[in-house]
Image (cartoon, rainbow, N blue to C red):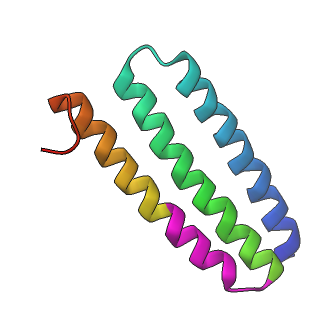
Amino acid sequence: MLDTVILIVFSMIGIALLLNLWRLIVGPSVPDRILALDTMYINTIALIILYGLQMDTALYFEAALLIAMLGFVSTVAVCKYLLRGDIIE
């Protein structure tokens, strides 16, 4: 039962990633594109955690944590660049 649910969730998150990619490419404004990229990070983290559940290993949880930290820092850096024009003061 759990294997079937994991496959269904894999497909749902895959569809969400495709829709985020569409918003990233077509997005009418830069903030829309930043939000789409941030949402893609979150969906990628969910995919990695699901894969770790399916493979029954804890290594993928550490990779998901690393991607979460990099995603947060990059989102903050891009937003700071858009607001001030530079990243480092």
Rendered residue at 69%/34% (across/down): 18
Relative horizontal placement of residue 10, taking residue 45 as reference (left or right): right
Residue 85: image quadrant is top left
Vertical placement of residue 47 versus 2, above or below: above
Residue 3 image position (x, y, % from top left): 87, 72
Residue 33: image quadrant is top left
Relative horizontal placement of residue 14, taking residue 67 as reference (left or right): right
The magenta stretch spans residue 21:
no
Vertical placement of residue 57 versus 73, above or below: below
Residue 2 image position (x, y, % from top left): 82, 76
Rendered residue at 74%/58% (across/down): 9
What kind of secondary structure does the magenta stretch mostly adopt?
helix
The magenta stretch spans residue 63:
yes
Residue 15 image position (x, y, % from top left): 72, 40
Look at the image and give the residue range highlighted in magenta. 56-67
Assign the C terminus to one quadrant of the image: top left
Rendered residue at 58%/78% (across/down): 62
Residue 58 image position (x, y, % from top left): 67, 86
Relative horizontal placement of residue 77, taking residue 46 as reference (left or right): left
